[in-house]
Amino acid sequence: MNFTIQNVLILDGPGYQTVDVQVAVSDEGASSIVAIAPNLEPMGRLIDGRHKLLLPGFVNAHTHSSEMWQRGIIPPYPLELWIAELYEFTPLKPHQIYLSALGTAVETLLSGGTTVVDHLVIIPGLEKESVKAAIQGYREAGIRAFVGPLIQDEALGASLPTGGTSVDLAPHYHGTPELLQLMEELVQDYHRPEEGIHIMTAPTGPQLCSDALFEGCADLSDRYQLCRHTHLLETRAQNMLAHEKYGCSVVKHLQDVGFLGDRTSLAHCVWLEDEDIQHLVDTRSTVVHNPLSNLRLGSGIAPVLKYRQAGVNVTFGCDGSASNDSQDLLEAIKIGTILHNPTDLDYRHWITPREAIAMASLGGATGLALQDQIGSLEVGKQADFVLYDLTSLSLLPRTDPAGLLILGRPTQAVDSVWVNGRQVVADGQPTQVNVKTLRQDLFDHSEWATNRTSTMASEFEIRYRAVMGL
Amino acid sequence: MNFTIQNVLILDGPGYQTVDVQVAVSDEGASSIVAIAPNLEPMGRLIDGRHKLLLPGFVNAHTHSSEMWQRGIIPPYPLELWIAELYEFTPLKPHQIYLSALGTAVETLLSGGTTVVDHLVIIPGLEKESVKAAIQGYREAGIRAFVGPLIQDEALGASLPTGGTSVDLAPHYHGTPELLQLMEELVQDYHRPEEGIHIMTAPTGPQLCSDALFEGCADLSDRYQLCRHTHLLETRAQNMLAHEKYGCSVVKHLQDVGFLGDRTSLAHCVWLEDEDIQHLVDTRSTVVHNPLSNLRLGSGIAPVLKYRQAGVNVTFGCDGSASNDSQDLLEAIKIGTILHNPTDLDYRHWITPREAIAMASLGGATGLALQDQIGSLEVGKQADFVLYDLTSLSLLPRTDPAGLLILGRPTQAVDSVWVNGRQVVADGQPTQVNVKTLRQDLFDHSEWATNRTSTMASEFEIRYRAVMGL
């Protein structure tokens, strides 16, 4: 249905403008912003935009939805021990994956996101069912989704540096050709860009994947025009391992195997050297900054100001709910915006609220090669946008709306959300998801847990402490 | 009115227990927890605690309420330029101070706080009216409040290091004896601990106050048993200035002038040297950590893990809303809990969710010398506590409630709040404040502002960049 948002505040250069925004939606569900100007002739359904701010939708550019089942429970651990506990207790039913995808979608939508990138943990033996379940959740919620099954062809123990000692590891239960075959079938079955559902190739990271897997994924991505996604140099231990494994810059190595590019987004990038940055620039790769996860796991502070100064596209992710432990995208953007200030004495390099908005919207779209279709309020683009209620107590008194939204802690501030012209949040509530039922389902499928002990984390801990000199 | 919360979850050692909590409230409004145990004989009003977590109230241990009028609007500046803009546009009507105190109280209550420490910016010429207005707001909201008027006897320009050059500054418009006289009158007029309203002595900080002012405040605090509060070594520039001004450790200097002690709380403490920590230990002073403000202003990362290892009491504050830009105490606690992980490779030193809860509750009470009266759920203590709804979507699926609350991003999770046995939040809404009216008042007294320019910040900027080598 066509619609017009009337008298709504939008960003305009360094200031604001009050305009009407008109959207045409075809019978097939394709949307297009047809006009943005003050006092337009009314068209279609009329929506009152007074005292509201309209922004392009943000991208939750890196998460792992099913981690939601373990949020709040993993102790303060670095990634290498945290992940052992995570894997030990990972959900094993596709229905759980469906529910946590729904929960991830709802929390993302209610915090300004219209697109989610799910680096999806898949259930061994139920790989296709896992992907199917997540996609079902995203379709139901009405969010734009990129699903990248987390694949690896090395056993988890391979992700720890050896410190020069020899370590015996069983082979991973999935072989490389088998994984690539699975990926191709998933693309055929589920990759539907025109419906807002994308499959992406997403090997876990250099710490767990062979060159053959990276190359195979790059090839698949070229053949089907898929986005590529991986973890890169998240932790100090991964940095040590990369030196052991490649003997050269892992960033350069990924470039050499053909994985980098303008459809590639790289989660974390905490431990890159200055000289690595040029490889990102040269390949037009995108960095996904996950500030809360990087703090929670003690991974470090990514050199985001340096990336920006070099011209690298940077956007934000929540990361999975077990390392954050939330999917509030506005929180990730706030912390990602201010975290770097202490790292650079010259405040002229600090990220402004308006720059943060651009990073989260157009930056996110660019990392998914959708910058011509979404990511900004422009005539001809699709209608992925969010209407914020500026009379929320958390956004008062009235000052600078962009500053309030990004530097404040907006609560109940998202009034409405449209994804490709379809309204999926109205009056602060998802229109496609019954939140009360979702809460009850999540409640019923879980139980209070305390003093859970992870055998796997304890095993990894001995090696971890030795190799990290603890 | 006496009441019993039935079947509620509380922390118990490393786990949880389901109990009833009984509170007796006298006709004079004094409360006392009289029993905590499973299956108690019902007493007074009965409250259903099922699927809820009861925690002691947290302390928002450092804020400046009237900064709320400028939240979201000050550009990314370090403190020294930020404060110039803040002062240039500071509110000048006591009614504004009343409204922002009310707003600060509501946001604190709705994020787990039962006590606020307001380092209150006072209006020149309307000092008493300013304090009266803030206290009116806190009394109305029903929050426990410590109001420390921000006093200084040096002009704002004195807060910049000179770099060895001579700088002419006008004397401050308030003389030292005049300020001390004002403070004593405020104590007589407004200090009512038994009613939950405390005046504290709170010189701005070494960068703007003479020794005479610190000594006078310490003396006043001894005579009236007041708490003491000040800013300490928040920024790199303050650290430079302290070296210029004292030629020795400013921490030692504050100890020598008698300002430190077990009723003293010190906001920020970002730039202390290792040897300063012992002065905090020796005097049993409390550090108030304001992580969001420290990031927003680029002040640095306070060495909180070192403080804790040395045995210093550390608690959390939001800081004023213009440097955060929120009063969500749970957000400050989350970031204050995880921010330090990257600074210490050994995760065994990292703050756990339960430790964070203790820091925010008993730690806050200890900094205000109220550790025997509030800060924990114990028979005999006053009833300052908060009931969290564990069925909030943001706290599901069910895992470890403490972890979900501290490491997650709780939204609409505060169900009920009691301060000294009086229920001030019920069903997620303040009972004493009409939030709709408050929002309208804040809206009506403000306007959207963009491209505001601060003359004072521009003037300070020249000196700041020169002395900081920018």
Image: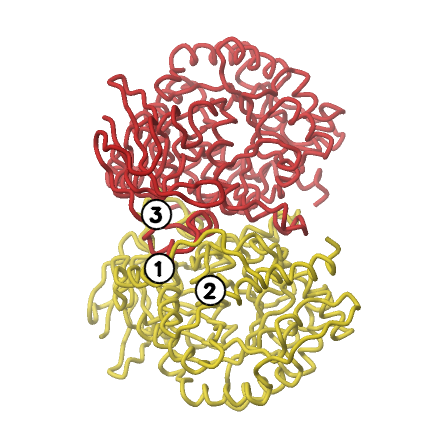
Chain colours: A yellow, B red
Marks 3 and 2, how far apart in space? Answer: 21 Å
- Do the residues at discs 1 and 3 belong to one chain? no
The image's mark for residue A391 is: none
Marks 2 and 1, how far apart in space? Answer: 19 Å
Marks 1 and 3, how far apart in space? Answer: 15 Å
Say whether residue B279 is left or right of residue A37: right
- For mark 3, what is the residue? B413
Q: Are the two marked residues, 2 and 1, in contact with CB atoms closer than 8 angstroms?
A: no
Q: Nearer the viewer, residue B247 or A327?
A: A327
Q: Indicate the amino acid at tag 2.
A: Glu
- For mark 1, what is the residue? A110
Vertical position of residue B237 compared to residue A182: above or below = above
What x and y, as percent, mark residue A287?
A: 58, 67
- For mark 2, what is the residue? A67
Say whether residue B323 is left or right of residue A257: left
Q: Nearer the viewer, mark 3 or mark 2?
A: 2
Secondary structure beneath disc 1? loop
